[in-house]
Image (cartoon, helix red, strand yellow):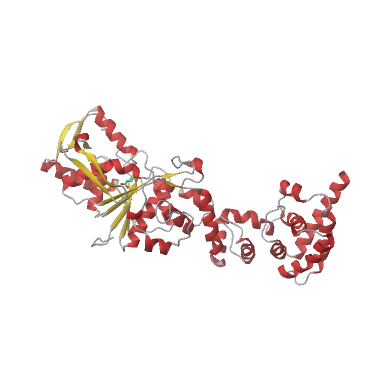
Amino acid sequence: MTAARPPRLRFAPSPTGALHIGGARTALYNWLAARHDGGELVLRIEDTDRERSTEENWEQIVDALEWLELDWDEGPVSQFGRAERHRRALARLLESGAAYRDAATAKDVEAWKAERGAGAGYRGTPSDEPGAAVRLRVPDAGETVVEDLIHGPVAFPNASYDDFVIARGDGTVLYNFAVAVDDAEMGITEVVRGDDHLSNTPKQLLVLAALGHEAPRYAHLPLLHGPDGKKLSKRHGAASVQELREAGYLPAAVRNYLALLGWGTDDDTTLMPTAELVRRFRVDDVGKAAAIFDEKKLRWLNGRYMRELPLEDYVAAVARHLGREPDERLREACAIAQEKAQTLDEVWPLIRFLFEPPVDDPKSWQKVMRPGVEEPLAAAREALGDVEPFAPEPIEAALAPVLERFELKPGRLYQPIRVAITGSSVSPGIFESLAALGRADSLARIDEALVRLRSAKLDE
Ligand code: GLU
């Protein structure tokens, strides 16, 4: 960017719901654009829809941004709290004649209700009925052109706008007016937001022009779709940042994945740490096509981040996710699970056997504990009784002769041991698992499995 002054951006969510994945990407792009150029980011909460805005949603959005580790330089600013400024701007337009009082029709009311569909708009005030209104004078001819950084110039003929309503008779302004005034008065230089706001932009530009403000630069981000090409929704998996967090994704991986949805490389599974994203990100390089959010790819990328975390950080993240103490036991468990888990959620099933008696997975048992496993398992148990020290390498060495004696492929011996000590056919490496569990528990669990195998045989 060649702007002389550092850019000032804003993220402007409406607190009418949780922060969705599309909103999180918008926040991230604003943050990256601000950080790339040593600019500033303002968090403006568009809480003018008094019926649907809640404090709980406000907090959830702030929490979600904090979890994503996206910081801001000013705010959170309440848009509703700026009502007095909106009124003053309106008064200026009335004074200059750029706006005038008129009767509002039922059609006007429909139009201002539709503005709420954009995510905000004063709602539920007593004046939500046809009555008096304030209209902006719109030139009859010519066009209003949005010079969009992503879409290029998009022209809207002025003839398609009547003098539209910017405020109700009681002075409460409408959504597009509030946004334009705020962007101007907050010194916003770039507006980066979802595609669904492109059609609002000409109205905002007309308001800005009437107020004599310079317009910011606009970038409208293509929507996110699911892998089936449909608009992203809950049926594609996690839909909100909160859900991503609960599912055990790491914020750094989420930033990486979301950043590449529509920007950067053709391959949205590329590993790009945040510092590199900040260095390279330019909003002008965002593509025009809808991007696909595919949770499978995020999961894969998350697994890469999980494997590359220093053990201390890994243990801390797992402990936080599980609500456990990051003690020595957990550290040992994490050390053997780190290679295997793609999300924090996947860690516990892999390490639970180190904290609790094995939970039997009937399918694993059925598949693995087949006729003929009893003898080699008993032999393995004997061999393990003598291993000194009870550590991965000596354990491997002690089991090798058992494989040879029974002429078994490794899996044929290791899987029954695994099912015996963990209850499942999926676990961290078998030698590491045995060593972490310790000799006494390992032998006791194998003995128990042998008893079950023998009684099953008697039942036949
Ligand atoms: N509050 C709007 C929304 O949540 C965003 C408005 C804007 O960025 O201009 O969709």
Point out the residue furthest to the bottom here.
389
Q: Tell me where residue 448 appears, x and y as whole percent.
A: 80, 55
- The quadrant in which residue 442 appears is bottom right
Ligand 1 picture quarter: top left
Q: In this view, does 350 lie to the left or right of 173?
A: right
* Residue at (22% x, 34% y) in the render: 160
Point out the residue furthest to the left here.
96
Does any portion of residue 63 appear in the rendered image? Answer: no
Quadrant where the image shows the N terminus = bottom left
Residue sitting nearer the eye, 50 or 428: 428
Q: Tell me where residue 187 appears, x and y as whole percent.
A: 24, 55
Q: Is residue 393 left or right of residue 46?
A: right
As displayed, is residue 124 above or below residue 304? above
Q: Tell me where residue 190 appears, x and y as whole percent.
A: 28, 53
Q: Tell me where residue 450 appears, x and y as whole percent.
A: 82, 54
Does any portion of residue 270 appear in the rendered image? Answer: yes
Residue sitting nearer the eye, 361 or 401: 401
Quadrant where the image shows the C terminus = top right
Q: How many labels does the image show?
A: 0
* Residue at (38% x, 52% y) in the render: 27
Point out the residue furthest to the right here.
458
As displayed, is residue 90 above or below residue 354? above
Q: Is residue 248 left or right of residue 95?
A: right
